[in-house]
Image (cartoon, rainbow, N blue to C red):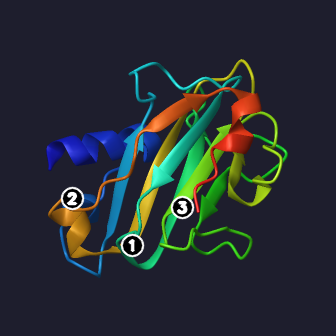
Amino acid sequence: MAWARSSLFFYATGATPEIAVKITGADMQYAFTFTDSKQQPLEGGKSYRLYLPANIPAKDFWSLVVYDNETRSMLETERFPTLGSDKARLVVNSDTSVDVYFSPKDPAGKESNWVQTLPGRGWNVILRLYGALQPWFDKTWRPGEIKEVAQQDLARCWIS
């Protein structure tokens, strides 16, 4: 529990006991990463793909928010640096899984599931689950790893 509070302190300069409470369907849960699948720091000039498996365990909604490593604020991009189940434009795969793309340039045909990053800026991302469900707590559902992809290969990444 202390680790959860310490981690939140990095972002919010505060600590709330609720961040470490486990109440299925009623609480918020956060997971975050600063690295890709090869444990390399996330870089704003590179392109990445994150696969969120089917049945994302959030009763209310889920979101991904991208933060600047230096300022600890949301990344200042032309587009709001967030994506989630509350976005009308989000494209959900037929099995309810979701592919998310992080890159400085919009990936042609995938703009609905794209979060803009900035070259020269390190970033990190928080997956927020509001009304987290049992598959999150028992770890039967886990988000995929963020994998680097070449910008030109983004067109071949779409999974339906």
Residues at marks 1 and 3 touching, judged by CB atoms closer than 8 Å: no
Q: Earlier in the sequence, mark 1 or mark 3?
A: 1
Residue 125 circle label: none
Residue 98 circle label: 3
- The quadrant in which the C terminus is found is bottom right
User: Amino acid under label 1?
Assistant: Asn
What is the x, y in percent for residue 17?
Answer: 23, 61
- Position of residue 64 in the picture relative to residue 11 (left or right): right
Q: Which of marks 1 and 2 is nearer the N terminus?
A: 2
Choose between 12 and 106: the one closer to the eye. 106
Q: Earlier in the sequence, mark 3 or mark 2?
A: 2
Residues at marks 1 and 2 touching, judged by CB atoms closer than 8 Å: no
Q: Name the residue under label 2.
A: 20
Q: Is residue 75 visible?
A: no
Residue at disc 2, secondary structure: helix
Residues at marks 3 and 2 touching, judged by CB atoms closer than 8 Å: no
Q: Can residue 98 be seen in this view?
A: yes
User: Amino acid under label 2?
Assistant: Ala
- Position of residue 79 in the picture relative to residue 122 (left or right): right
User: Amino acid under label 3?
Assistant: Val
Label 1, label 3: how far apart the Cα atoms are: 9 Å
Q: Name the residue under label 1.
A: 55
**Disc number lying in front (3 or 2):** 3
**Total numbered badges shown on the rendered structure:** 3
Q: Which residue is drawn at 36% across and 50% down?
A: 31
**Disc number lying in front (1 or 2):** 1
Say which quarter of the image contains residue 55.
Answer: bottom left
